[in-house]
Amino acid sequence: MQIESFKVFRDLVESRSFSKAASLNFITQSAVSQQVRAMEERFRVPLIERSNKRFGLTREGQMLYEASKQIVFEFDSLQHQLSEMRNVISGTIRLSTVYSIGLHELPPYLKKFLKEFPNVNVHVEYRRSNQVYDEVIEGTSDLGLVAFPVQKKTLKVEPFRKDKLVVICIPSHEMAREEEIVVERLKKEKFIGFEPDIPTRKAVDHIFREAGLEVNPVMEFDNIETVKRAVEIGAGVSIVPRATVEQEVTNGTLAAVEFKGQPYYRPLGIIYKSGRVLSPAMKRFLKTLKDPQHLPGTLPVGEAD
């Protein structure tokens, strides 16, 4: 029996989907079913509960799943150790990230990494925050980049950067002439916000609650780019990470104003599946992401103004 069969079975159990297991292993759904049947015939036991509509394992299937995880883990560890001994950095990294990080924070790190390791292919997918977590947990992505990272039992979370939050408005707005403003200044403004399930929205709501303000957004969007476009046409003001508006501020289409007093930040995190073996390429990529160099609008975690 080949090692691939154990990996297919592990992926099937963890994703609970024949189609996802097929996609992860670059085979057809039919091939996944055939490999499961072949394992059942080889061990002469049923592995999947076929009487239930929902995916379930038999007792023997659960035992094989635990063994499959260990077998694949040991095999991957051996492969990566041999690659490191040969100093070979290659392969593919599947990265899932939210739009704002992927478009504004990631590019300089990605450029630096690919220049140093041209034999590595970094495949970037742009997703909503909840989808990033799902894809990393299911194994369809190797790494995820998220804002306000949430600790989960099946995930390893490492700090990435901190974005300073600022108020944005059109350059002709009276606030644009001020260097700093207090949160209460936004009380009478038309506010453009994010949809309720976006992590940055929850942080902004927390800022308003602390200040005792009730702000009802006149518009709500699910991504940073649409929020910026709405502010640019004078529909209102918003609160966004400074790194996401550097280009617009430079071009003169938006003005960014900082908060007076203690600044507010948006922490960014790197997530990957707990217990997984990191390839040499992933280890080097993580090292690049945690490079202490300063980039516009961001700070390494732990630093303050």
Image (tube, rainbow, N blue to C red):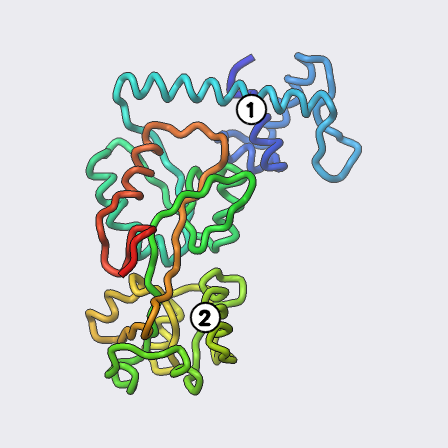
Query: Horizontal placement of 169 versus 116: left or right?
Result: right
Neighbours of disc 1 within 10 Å: few (<14), some (14-19), many (20+): some
Task: Please give the name of the residue rendered at 23% of the width and 71% of the height, measured from the top-left corner.
Answer: 249
Q: Give the residue type at disc 1.
A: Lys
Query: Horizontal placement of 81 versus 134: left or right?
Result: left
Residue beneath disc 2: 207
Question: Mark 2 or 1, which is nearer the eye?
Answer: 2
Label 1: which secondary element: helix
Quarter of the image that includes the N terminus:
top right
In the displayed structure, would residue 160 be above or below residue 298?
Answer: above
Residue beneath disc 1: 69
Cα–Cα gap, marks 2 and 1: 44 Å
Q: Earlier in the sequence, mark 2 or mark 1?
A: 1
Neighbours of disc 2 within 10 Å: few (<14), some (14-19), many (20+): some
Pick the front one: 171 or 204: 204
Check whether the beta carbons of the residues at disc 2 and disc 1 lie within 8 A of each other: no
Where is residue 239 shown, x and y percent of the image? 38, 71
Q: Is residue 253 visible?
A: yes
Q: Give the residue type at disc 2.
A: Ile
